[in-house]
Amino acid sequence: MLDQEKVFDCLARHGVSYFAGVPDSYLNGFCNYALAHCGDRNVITANEGNAVALAAGHYLATKEIPLVYMQNSGEGNAINPLASLVDKDVYAVPMILLIGWRGQGNTEPNHPQHWRQGEITASVLDIMHIPYSILTDDNEAFARAVDKAVTYCREARGVYAFIAPKGVMADPDKPNNVDAAYPMSREEAIEVILDHMPENTIYSATTGRATRELFFLRQKRGETKARDFLNVGSMGHASSVALGIALARPDRPVVALDGDSAAMMHMGAMTMVSKVKAPNFLHVVLNNGAHESVGGQPSAGHLVDFTKIAQACGYATVGKAVETEGELTEAIEQLKNCPKAAFIDCRIHKGLSRKLPPIVFDHREAIDALIDDLNG
């Protein structure tokens, strides 16, 4: 991994000292250094498009070149403002992008959700006429790349990107930081939900730890995985997949096991229940106030009132967040048969309740089993 103190010193010498973005495990060294040392000049945003727009606002107000960081899966969220806001032919807002290169080559053979994104990472930049450098674990080469990027940004009033392959900006050992903010772990909360929903319930689990924990809980409990949609990619969309299933199969209970960061990434999805009838849909946000799967950086999850937001969007709720197994059980019993879509903000602590290996499974086989269950 690059020496992160040297990375930030180099950026600062070139006037780059404002950062915005969405944390990524391939960038966790960079993200954690920014979190520890940059204060309010580092803003963790809801999604990557937000980060580009925020950085644009900062440039307009200061003329300082900002840096936006993201996993390459976030390129899709960022394309709109990159192409129609900051592009040289629109408002010509210079900035540096730092993109973690998940799925490069054969670096992640067990994670096909990253393969296509890894393949097209550089091509997306080419299509948008954004020049880039592929970083290496070489501090002197990084300094030269920064000089080239900043020169381009200032002279062309354009965007320049750094692509960071595995190991360049990330510590391979991600800590399991367990806090005591709330008594339940995510795994414990998921098990309570499994215990108190009908056996034929369909589950849509958000990307990251929720998918992994649901997968291994099914193994531990000796239960079928054929009723589970594991949203291993497409962060922020698990609840929409769940709602789509619920609307098509009103005879089946459907639960979205969402995360706070994922729910906020595409919070507009929550408004859809105001326009449709889905009494069989239960949306649970497993809210630990962190981007757990990429390094534990803080989200706004514990700072916002998801329950009031959900009520305003048309969900039935119990009026407050739940914090214990007993409160979660009571909420499920109260809401699982209510006449409209329901929502629970389930407050949990950070950290894993047990160490789990990566999920290795046949994605086509798993989705076909779910399709067969829903259409059998």
Image (cartoon, helix red, strand yellow):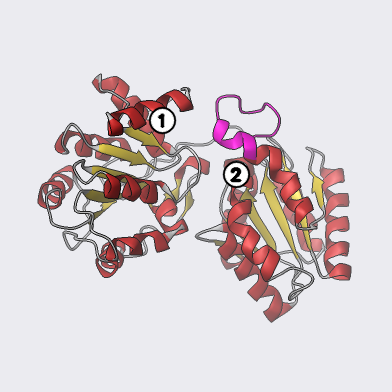
Asked if residue 253 shows in the view, the reply is yes
Extent of the magenta region: 102-116
Q: Nearer the viewer, mark 2 or mark 1?
A: 1
Left or right, residue 208 beside residue 372? right
Q: Is 272 or 142 nearer to us in this picture?
A: 272
Residue under label 2, please give it.
28
Image x and y of residue 372, in percent = 33, 28
Asked if residue 171 shows in the view, the reply is no
Q: Residue furthest top?
A: 222
Which quadrant holds residue 77?
Answer: bottom right
Secondary structure under tag 2 reads: helix
Identify the image quadrant of the C terminus: top left
Which quadrant holds residue 18?
Answer: bottom right
Left or right, residue 11 beside residue 257? right
At label 2, the amino acid type is Asn
Magenta region includes residue 297 = no
